[in-house]
Amino acid sequence: MNDKVNVNPEPRPNNSFSARVKEEASSAPIKSVCCATAEMSALAYAAATLAYDEDNALSLRVVSRSASAVRRAKALGRALLGREPVPAGQAGASEAVWDGDDARRILSVCGLLGDQGWFAVSDVERPTVGAKPCCRAAFLRGSFLGGGSAADPAKEYHLELVASDERLAGIWVELLEGLRLTPRLVSRKNQRVVYLKEAEQIATLLTVIGAPTSRLAVEDARIFKGMRNQVNRATNCDSANLDKAVDASSRHIRAIEIVASTAGLGALPDSLRETAQARLNHPELPLAELGRTLIPAVGKSGMNHRLRKIERLAESLAAKKIVHDPGSPRI
């Protein structure tokens, strides 16, 4: 294989939500060698490549567009080797490189070097559901750093882990279900995608992998969306009630005008005439407020009863086409 090392350019600054989550998660303390092993095995399997030069010398590269993931890989390598690695070429900020014995030792500890001298996920040093919580969390953290992403919670709730190997995706599903989460598994081209869509579950996983501030961002987005939905529902309800009130007021006024142009408002009993005049004077008021303009005040049901009487009378007069007669008897 080619032994040349490409000098990768410095990664561009990334302020996406995924980048912020990885930055925070990569700052979590490395508590023990077993946790470092679990995390490195997941991160390396998701983001590393192996190469042999013509002298059969081995090199391990963790390459990522996430500078946080690369920095974390270097820190994990130091924890596993007990020292800084032997400098390997001119590795840039977008890759972490180990050569020779350092590469072989990391791969061996993580269970990533199979019989064929290549990655072997079936042998990966991974924690089971019954393993220590810190190691399970470390494995999930390495998985997210190496192959995960999260959407901006202000726009949508979506967190995913992408694997090219179905067995690794199965490990993720098993570990997430061990946290009482409900991951979904789908195929996308030649990859397997394990994802979460519920805000509460995403928030739980972010806490587990060491990103509590990002969890708060998800919680804030969920609360904001909930409040906005409540406001929208209240606004829609108020708008609907206003439309009903306007329609009712218009209906009342049409009925009053029919009575006025036929029998005349003077033909109405005092209570109905006062009600009709109040509605003409205050077309914008709902029934409860309209009733309070009368002396004595009348309740909502009382006003509704009176105005219905006026409407029925208007319907009757319109049907008979009675022409107003000033001398006609009172109704």
Image (cartoon, rainbow, N blue to C red):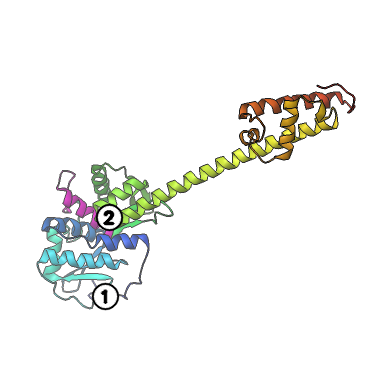
Region in magenta: 123-145
* C-beta proximity under 8 Å, tags 1 and 2: no
| Mark 2 Cα-neighbour bin, 10 Å: few <14, some 14–19, many ≥20 | some
Secondary structure beneath disc 2? helix
| Residue linked to disc 2 | 212
Secondary structure beneath disc 1? loop
Q: Is residue 134 visible?
A: yes
Residue 111 coordinates in the image, percent (x, y) = 15, 56
Q: Earlier in the sequence, mark 1 or mark 2?
A: 1
Residue 287 coordinates in the image, percent (x, y) = 64, 33
| Residue linked to disc 1 | 92
- In the displayed structure, does residue 192 sit left or right of residue 116? right
Say the numbered circle drawn on residue 119.
none
Residue 199 coordinates in the image, percent (x, y) = 36, 47
Q: Quadrant of residue 92?
A: bottom left
Quadrant for the N terminus in the image: bottom left
